[in-house]
Amino acid sequence: MKEKVILWILALCCLLAGCAAPRSAPVPSAPPSSPEAQENRPLTVWSVYWDCQESVAVIGGAADRIEAVSLFAAYFRDGALFLPQKTLETLQALRDSDAWAQKPIYLSVVNDVTEGETTIQKDTGILQSVLSPQQAESHARALIAMARENGFDGIEIDYEKIRKDRSLWQLFLAFEEILLPLAEEAGLGLRIVLEPGIPAETLPFPQGADYVVMCYNLHGIGTEPGPKADLAFLRALYDRFAGLPNLSFALANGGFDWEEASGKAVSLTEKDAAALAEAHQVLPRRDAASGALSFSYTQDSTRHTVWYADSETLALWAAELDACAGKTVPISIWRVD
């Protein structure tokens, strides 16, 4: 399985060359993009702390094609920043390899909050607190200290669900203005992950950080069945975010399994989806508008619909963004699995 995932990453870099996807309908035509450009595409991958052993093997095996890694994630526990031990173990395992001794490794920080046995994901209440004028500088310094003391090369801020809250965006932008010079002084890179629904055109994001747009929220939990992105969605996102400095794009493999009667959706990795198709002896079909794969199956008299992205899908999405930009764009992949 490790070798298959390594090939998956290499296939994306080579733009459909050597992909080993399930048999399906023909792939839609991707915008032209030279093999040389694909070989040189800046590529960052996320590794999650609950699957660090597999991640280290995959990242190590494809080190010549991966520019940077973002380790997911530090969060808030009992009111303070918390860094899981498995994240540190992943960092150390990568540093112990020759390939990753000098390559940049970022610490991703999210606004998930754990209090005792309760966890709230993407909690904006904690952001109102730590980004307030009274706490913004101390929060920035705590992030810098956590990254430096543990040997990271940069910080990735992945604070979500701010959406169109103008007052919270004002706090965030003021915090970023504090964090940027501190990171530069400490020799740390800074990545800012942005959700697709934010009012990007009217927010004055400062120079100095790398901005990463999430391009995979078109369909998911709470929506009707469909792909995480399609080509029209990507073009619209590019147009809205094109004015940001140091812009890159995050794509995601995998997808969701919708139970048709209830509308409930369950997240699936690409491996999960392919295994489901095989178990139910169905042939996934590739959608012309998105390049994503889909199929339906029945289990316990309940009809299910699955949509997911594989390496061919991601390569098509990357090429579409290249066509919008008129150049090879940096890509981040959620996630190594």
Image (cartoon, rainbow, N blue to C red):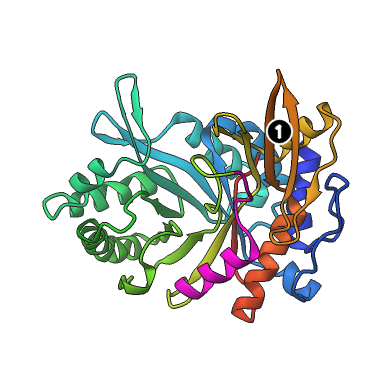
Residues drawn in magenta: 225-240
Q: Is residue 193 above or below residue 79?
A: below
Q: Quadrant of residue 254?
A: top right
Residue 306, horizontal then vertical, whole percent? 69, 39
Report if residue 231 lies within the magenta region.
yes
Q: Nearer the viewer, residue 250 or 256?
A: 256
Q: Is residue 19 above or below residue 38?
A: above
Q: Quadrant of residue 172?
A: bottom left
Q: Residue furthest bottom?
A: 326
Q: Residue at x 26, y 57 (%)?
A: 165
Is residue 210 left or right of 15 when viewed as pictured? left
Is residue 113 left or right of 227 when viewed as pictured? left
In which quadrant of the rendered image does the C terminus lie?
top right
On the question of residue 328 being in view, the answer is no
Q: Residue at x 36, y 41 (%)?
A: 122
Characterize the local packing of mark 1: few (<14), some (14-19) or many (20 or more) Cα atoms within 10 angstroms: some
Residue 246, horizontal then vertical, whole percent? 47, 72
Q: Is residue 312 above or below residue 113?
A: below
Is residue 4 left or right of 260 when viewed as pictured? right
| Secondary structure, magenta segment, majority class | helix
Q: Residue furthest left?
A: 134
On the question of residue 90 being in view, the answer is yes
Residue 209, horizontal then vertical, whole percent? 40, 67
Residue position marked by numbered label 1 in the rendering: 272
Residue 265, horizontal then vertical, whole percent? 56, 34
